[in-house]
């Protein structure tokens, strides 16, 4: 018996109650979450933190970075300060830690839930507001749009790294 075909997020239609562009971002983040669930959730600690080559990142580090950076970008895009406790350089965030994969996945889920909840509150006027990002100023929409694009880029790396891990095991 075949598993039922799941409709991909980009074909699921509008998220009710939010502007169209926010709906698109939320659907893209659903896709990221589904990629993480499919390609990272069943890995052993060894596979989760495996680094395939110098200059590459482990799946666990990518999962940490997607969640953490999405939340930080949401804070910046909504004009909030990023608390010192969660300011971290990407290289540090993606470095292997050996932390239990389920703890990392739970933190990822929490960060994504907070990010999506904040996005759901946005109205069109919020997207036009000029916000500061480091030394730059831009409309909030540009920073908020980067959340999904950035997360999808790293989700692709998770898929590739998982395929390399699987090949490494044979």
Image (tube, grey):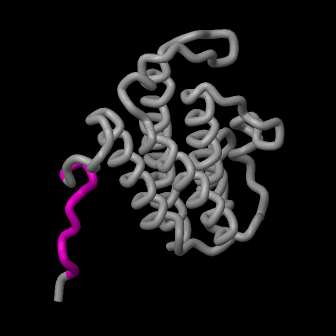
**At 42% across and 17% down in the image, what residue appears?**
128
Q: Is residue 158 left or right of residue 25?
A: right
Which residue is most to the right? Answer: 84
Rendered location of residue 46, percent (x, y): 68, 69
Number of on-image labels: 0
Q: Is residue 131 left or right of residue 95?
A: left
Rendered location of residue 158, percent (x, y): 50, 53
In depth, the one of 27 and 154 nearer the eye is: 27
Residue 57 visible in the current orientation: no
**At 69% across and 36% down in the image, what residue appears?**
90
Q: Quadrant of residue 89?
A: top right
In depth, the one of 32 and 23 nearer the eye is: 23
Q: What stretch is highlighted in magenta?
A: 3-11
Q: Does the magenta stretch include residue 5?
A: yes
Rendered location of residue 126, percent (x, y): 45, 25
Q: Is residue 129 magenta?
A: no
Residue 90 visible in the current orientation: yes
Rendered location of residue 137, percent (x, y): 58, 10
**At 49% across and 49% down in the image, what residue appears?**
117
Q: In this view, does 33 lie to the left or right of 70?
A: left
In depth, the one of 84 and 32 nearer the eye is: 84
Image quarter of the N terminus? bottom left
Main SS class of the magenta portion in the image: loop
């Amino acid at each position: 018996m075949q598993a039922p075909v799941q409709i991909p997020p980009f074909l699921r239609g509008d998220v009710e109650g939010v502007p169209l562009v926010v709906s698109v971002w939320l659907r893209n983040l659903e896709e990221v979450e589904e990629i993480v669930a499919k390609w990272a959730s069943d890995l052993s600690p060894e596979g989760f933190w495996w680094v395939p080559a110098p200059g590459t990142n482990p799946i666990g580090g990518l999962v940490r970075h997607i969640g953490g950076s999405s939340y930080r970008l949401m804070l910046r895009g909504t004009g909030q300060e990023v608390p010192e406790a969660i300011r971290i350089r990407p290289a540090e965030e993606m470095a292997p830690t050996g932390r239990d994969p389920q703890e990392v996945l739970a933190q990822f889920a929490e960060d994504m839930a907070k990010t999506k909840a904040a996005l759901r509150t946005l109205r069109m006027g919020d997207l036009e507001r000029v916000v500061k990002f480091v030394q730059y100023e831009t409309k909030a929409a540009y920073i908020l749009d980067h959340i999904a694009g950035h997360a999808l880029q790293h989700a692709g790396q998770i898929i590739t790294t998982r395929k390399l891990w699987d090949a490494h095991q044979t």
